[in-house]
Image (cartoon, helix red, strand yellow):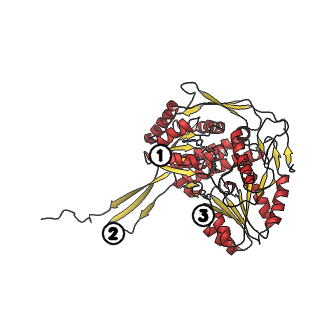
Amino acid sequence: MTKMTVIGASGAELPEAFTGRHLINGDWQDSADGATFDRVSPSHGVTVSTSAKGGKAETEAAIAAARAAFDDGAWRESPGKDRAALLNKVADLIDRERERIAVLEVLESGKPIAQARGEIEGAADLWRYAASLARMVHGESHNNLGPDMLGVVLKEPIGVAGIITPWNFPFLIVSQKLPFALAAGCTAVIKPSEMTPSTTVILGELLIEAGIPAGVVNIVLGYGDPVGALISTDPRVDMVSFTGSTAVGKKIVESAAGTLKKVSLELGGKNPQVIFPDADLDAAADAIVFGVYFNMGECCNSGSRIIVHQDVADGLLAKVTSLSEKVPFGDPMDERTQVGAIISDAHQQKIDSYVQEAKRAGAKVLMGGEALNVEGLDGRFYGPTVVADVTPDMAIAKEEVFGPVLSVLTFSDEDEAIALANNAAYGLSAGVWSRDIHTCLNFSRKVQAGTVWTNTWMDGFAEMPFGGVKESGQGRELGRYGLEEYLEVKTIQLRVARGRANWVRDS
Ligand code: NAD
């Protein structure tokens, strides 16, 4: 059996089960039919939350409230300064509630507590950054169209934004969308994942405390079908901002086609890291281990596909496996834990089936490759796993495993490395490791990805746009681009003197 560092049950005291209700037009509401659903912690096996289960009635009421709040004009026409003040207040309240949000996030998602705290702090930073953008919404003027013409381009809020989020970074991802939508002057209907609904409900509480007007932000809890599907189809919703799987992203595009609403998609990835022979292998090994085990590998940015030069492959893999043995995994409520629990039984089986299939196809499992019990916990855990001798045709080389599983391929020259990196339907992010700036730049320019990390992995900044190409999505979040997603362009052409030539000629 592989050596691993396992953290057993910490005995941390768990909070009472959370009760979540829909936020519709400023009121907390149960479902009309009283339906609810429970979330059982993937790490502790206890019920973490009971949430109202939304149906047609709740979704339509939430959409109607967001529509009315937008059309009323008070929010969209409010000065950017006032919207910024509200967003800053929400950021302060997030800081105040950091521990409560982090603990619920751990228990619903399985992620480690130290990481969850960092994510909540990162989310507060996004609210502050979006607040700064709220004061910077502006268009452009054209003063070169001739002496009697002035052109003005206005940026206007797009309208009602439907926001649909996944379970892997629930609070962070809603914070990559909602504050930017609000900064632009949009109103919103949010549907969090049915696996992790509760921290979005806490965000709703904080928004109310900060003074958000009724109807500007609405939250409907429940499943993709019907809630997400109704949001994507309804003509009263002007755009959908979705983060989740590529399969569901495609369904949303189909649902949105009927009304041609704008769709912004942050989808899956099969992100390559290419390691050239002149790279700092110690730095690369640490980043590889971080890139693949962070958030249990349940990460769109997981650096799950290593493409290493054949001359340094053995040395790099020895370093990677040695570091993998040291990564503490186990009880996510323990401060020391860096890899927590897998989101569900079904997902754990999916991860394992990729590893077993690769083994059957001739790949070599250097470590891990099995589900594990952590003493004292009723949870799902999958050990850090390194799979070598992977070939480009194997599913594990092309598809998103979304677990703590590293696939290793080798290359012999630069062109082959770039071709291998681009050999996936996805194009979210990519990495290159080399001490030669020309090698790094050549790779960065030729790789098909929305983000390229050179000699690093998964750094992120509120200022830097993020998103994918190919089947990893469309549109961008963060940076100024994150605001632009929620803005529409209006062209105004002003004739400023009586210079217009008559179209109808005198006969
Ligand atoms: P998912 O696609 O299963 O679900 C995402 C959300 O969509 C959930 O709220 C779900 O209820 C909802 N949904 C399901 N069916 C729907 C439908 N027919 N119409 C509308 N909404 C529907 O994704 P997941 O399993 O929650 O998350 C994991 C996926 O998310 C991975 O593929 C991952 O790569 C991706 N992801 C991408 C990014 C990014 O920024 N690119 C970030 C995080 C996660």
Identity of the residue drawn at 47% across and 46% down: 256
Question: Residues under labels 3 and 2: Cα distance?
Answer: 45 Å
Position of the C terminus by quadrant: bottom left
Mark 3 = which residue? 448
Q: Is mark 2 within 8 Å of ligand 1?
A: no
Name the residue type under label 3: Gln
| Secondary element type, mark 2 | loop
Who's the residue at 62% across and 66% down the image? 447
Q: Nearer the viewer, mark 1 or mark 2?
A: 1
| Residue 337: percent from left, percent from top | 81, 46
- Ligand 1 rendered quadrant: top right
Q: Which mark is residue 147?
A: 2
Residue 18 in view, yes or no: yes
Q: Is residue 88 left or right of residue 258?
A: right
Q: Name the N-terminal-most of marks 3 and 2.
A: 2
Separation (CA) of disc 1 from disc 2 = 43 Å
